[in-house]
Amino acid sequence: MAGKKVLVVYASRYGSTGEIAEEIAEVLRDVGVDVAVSNVLETERVAGYGGVVIGSPIYMGKWLPEAVDFVKNFQNDLRRVPVAVFAVGFSMKEPSETNRESGRAAISVIRPYVHPFDVGIFAGKLSFDELSPPDAEIIRMAGVTEGDYRDWDEIAAWAGELEPLFKDLP
C-alpha cells in the first residue's frame, strides 16, 4: 500500500531550480513514491505530506527569501516529517570544496527551523536572455559566462538516494 505523498517544493527566479525539482520528483515517481511538485509561492500547506524536499537557487550567497520564508512559515509541520533540501548555484559548475562549502553556508539560514536529513548542491544554468536587465548586468560585470551546467545524472543519483526514506511512509 502506498504511503503518504511527498512534496517537492522549490523557489526559482528563472526556472532552472523548478526543472531540477521536476527531475527529483520524476526519479521518486519512477521508484513508486507518490509525489506532488509546487512552487513555494503557490504552496498553502505542508500538513498531510509524509516528507518534503525543498530547493532554492543561491543568489548572492543566499537562498531566495521566499524559500527561507516557506521554511519559517511551515517549520512546525516540517519538523514532523523527513526533509531533504537542495541548492542550485551557478558557481557549482566548478564543484570545488570551497564552492560546496559556500552552498552549504547558503542553506545554514534554515537550520534553526528544520534539520534536513540530506542536502544536495547542484550546478545551475544561466542564459542572459532569460535574466532581468539588472541581473544580467551584474552577472556580466562579474565575468560569468552563460551555459547549462546542470548534471542530470548527479541530480538523479541524489534523488534516488532519498527513495528509501520516502518509499514506505506510514
Image (cartoon, rainbow, N blue to C red):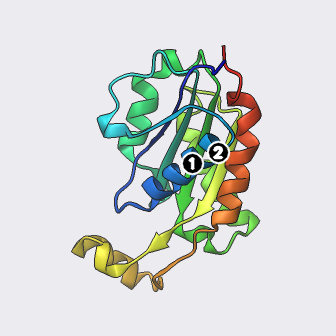
* Quarter of the rendering occupied by the N terminus: top right
Name the residue at 51% across, 49% down: 21
For residue 101, above or below residue 72: below
For residue 25, above or below residue 82: below
Q: Which of 79 and 62 is in front in this view?
A: 79
Name the residue at 50% across, 15% down: 76
Q: Nearer the viewer, residue 104 or 53?
A: 53
Q: Which of 60 and 161 is in front in this view?
A: 161
Q: Which of 37 and 116 is in front in this view?
A: 37
Rendered location of residue 42, percent (x, y):
30, 36
Local secondary structure at mark 2: helix
Rendered location of residue 45, percent (x, y):
38, 22
* Quarter of the rendering occupied by the C terminus: top right
Q: Residue 26 carries which label?
A: 1
Rendered location of residue 3, percent (x, y):
62, 20
For residue 57, above or below residue 81: below
Other residues around mark 1 within 10 Å, as few (<14) / some (14–19) / many (≥20): some
Quadrant for residue 88, please give it: bottom right
Asked if the residue under mark 1 is in contact with the one under mark 2, i.e. CB atoms within 8 Å, the reply is: yes
Name the residue at 59% across, 15% down: 80
Q: Name the residue under label 2.
A: 30
